[in-house]
Amino acid sequence: MYTFICEDSPNGIFSGVYDAWAFKIQQNKQMPDGGGQSGSRAAGQTRCTHDDIRLTSREPDNYELFSQYFPVTPSAEKSDKVARTLCARLGTEFYETVMNALLAVIPERKGEIDKADAIYHTVVLALSSPAGANTLHRLNHPHVHRVFTLSRATANEAHHLLGFLRFRELENGVLFSTIHPKNNALPILAEHFTDRLPQENFIIYDENRRQAAVHAAGKNFMLADASDLDEAMIKRESCREAEYQSLWLAFFENIAIRARVNPKLQAQNIPKRFWRDTIELSRTGGGHFPPSHAPLPPE
Amino acid sequence: MNIQMNMSLAEKLAILSDAAKYDVACTSSGVDRRGNGAGMGNSVAAGICHTFSADGRCVSLLKILFTNECIFNCAYCQNNCNSDVPRASFTPDEVCELTMEFYRRNYIEGLFLSSGIMVSPNYTMGLIYQTLYQLRRVHQFNGYIHVKAIPGADPVLVEKTGFLADRMSINLELPTAEGLKKLAPYKSRHTILKPMRQIQNRITENKNEVALYRKAPRFVPAGQSTQMIIGATPEHDYEIMRVAESLYQKFDLKRVFYSAFVNVNQDANLPVLPGGPPLLREHRLYQADWLLRYYDFTVDELLSEERPDFNIYLDPKCDWALRHLECFPIEINRADYRTLLRVPGIGAKSAQRIVKARRTAALGFSDLKKIGVVLKRALYFITCSGKMMYRTKLDEDYICRNLIGDRTQIPREIREAGYKQLSLFDIGMEP
């Protein structure tokens, strides 16, 4: 068994995929029979297959005895090559699914397949099988299923945030938003809002990862490290910001039907971890007390 | 009538969003439109929910009335001309300002504009048109707009408005013409269905125009919808679903919404519902509505003259399956898509996944679980490679007992909504 230890980032895992594949080819070249039929193999010198290779996106807790370990250095060049191959041979939809899986952060439970390993074997399977990108439909395959769940986790959270994200207008006219996603949904969000608000200057700040997507009017967005964010700057709001926030609160409180108030359903639909970053839920605690002029429920 | 002058924008918004809250449709789905690089906004076909109000309903659009001053006296409506509520009207500029500023801050996905009938249907429709025109042409708003067509308004105005909106709707209000006559004397089936037909024809025409000229302006690209109030009049579920089915078939509607009746006016003609609004009934109607649109069911398979109401303990699909045990068990690895859809516990998504996944290998029960099939419901009705999951009897009473034991049959939000004994109140609909 050969194990490749990669950094948990799109760059790191794609470099791992590249290295593992290159290693397999290299290994088989060195075989005395140049990788001939299995019948001609000498004892103990079997061909290296993809099943002998494992990727892991985290430092293993325990090193196994009969396994070789290789650390992977992230390389933009290698990961570019992998990305290009995936797009060209399996299409953008496949690439996007894999990309979403890469961005996912699911607490690893015992017995579950590692993210990097799932991606590597799914890619190998798709490139070698006639089904190509349709390999993703083979949900009975454990690696493919893992990629499917990871990718769905990111896509679902990103879709939630497309709605739950809130901008505040700062003094300098920039729209600013803070989010705390579990998975790294920032690239997906940035793309959506670049299309939606092309003529606005906006910043989406992922406080968990200290990363920001910065968009200037009329341009494409950039992902930037935001560890040195100016905290004072983002607190100074424009003069009309408070007014629009209170208008929004008024709308939010009036739109609920008193006879149907149902906090559990509300918390089921918008999970509480999203509440802190929305204006209406963090300030009203859900808004379960309708305004005074609302009609009373029937007695 | 209580008319106040010089109201602030905040006061108006409070009154006119409160007045709009009984309109159900708050979906922003049905149209995929990329941003145009210059104005503001795009639209995502799946729709996006921006928040959920205290009643757990999705808030996607800025749902407001243009005005709640109304010359009609529909008994079920809190804005009817006889009720004593504060009145207010927006100006087109105010609606534009709210929409643009809320949209920039990502509070909303677009605008839902409805209105009371001020002065005359034409006058009101004209104001709505003017608002939409300003939003689209002056403010370059490219997001989602859902607008109500006012029954009785000039067809030319309705058509011009339709070219600015994504979705249009005209509320059917009540399932039958008699109900409408009794509770909404100024409205009639005719004035409601006529513009509905007009919009349908124009959408069909427009599809041909767009096929010929790709850049032809789109007319109501997200289709039209309507809404019915449930529980204000004594119709059975069977009649309601028949109406919905014919709306889908004959009027090409995208959605029919059902709104559990809330007695806001304490009108003598209307039922008093001690158990609160008939939420479970509404839920069953939506479930059946889905069966019509995505699961290839017809109303006559689900209900009949003899059984005119849905089973409150079982969802409509389980109920159907129990009465048609002769169709089961079906073999997962061989049954076609339409047959898979009829199995309780298999939804449209899992059926699609099954059809794709079984191309490479025969599926077993553990694979079905991964795919998302609800096995505790499906296991009585399916085999995998000829085997059932457990030894179970294909017996109506036995399966029924087990299915009812499953608490998800009555959705959590209704179980926990705070009113008990929903079975009693839900059947006893008589006023």
Image (cartoon, coloured by chain):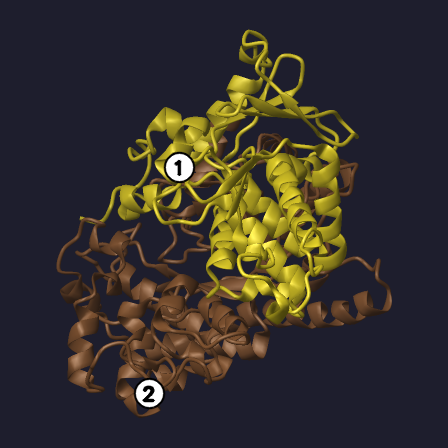
Q: Mark 2 or mark 1, which is nearer to you?
A: 2
Mark 1 secondary-structure assignment: helix
Residue shown at the point (83%, 60%) measured from the top left: B216
Q: Position of residue B343 (x, y in %)?
A: 37, 78
Compare residues B209 and B161 and report the one nearer the observer.
B209
Q: Is residue B286 above or below residue B39?
A: below
* Alpha carbons under labels 2 and 1: distance apart: 49 Å
Asked if residue B375 lies left or right of residue B7, the reply is: left
Q: Quadrant of the C terminus of chain B?
A: bottom left
Side (left or right) of B98 relative to B17: right
Does the CB distance between marks 2 and 1 fall below 8 Å?
no
Q: Is any atom of residue B315 visible in this view?
A: no
In percent of the image, x 21 and y 65: which residue is there? B406
Residue nearer the viewer, A21 or B271: A21
Q: In the rendered view, would you say A26 is above or below A131?
A: above
Position in image of residue B311 (x %, y %): 24, 75
For the point 65% across and 46% down, which residue is it?
A23
Towards the viewer: B397 or A52:
A52
Chain A appears in which tint? yellow
Residue B405 percent location from the top left of the image: 16, 67
In the displayed structure image, the side of residue B108 where residue B53 appears, left or right: left
Marks 2, 1 in one chain: no
The chain ID associated with circle 1 is A
Q: Is residue B70 above or below residue B173?
A: above
Instruction: Examine the image and state in which quarter residue B275 appears.
Output: bottom left
Secondary element type, mark 2: loop
Amino acid of disc 1: Asn
Disc 2 residue type (three-letter): Phe
Q: Nearer the viewer, residue B46 or B271?
A: B46
Name the residue that disc number 2 marks.
Answer: B328
The residue beneath circle 1 is A254
The chain coloured brown in the image: B
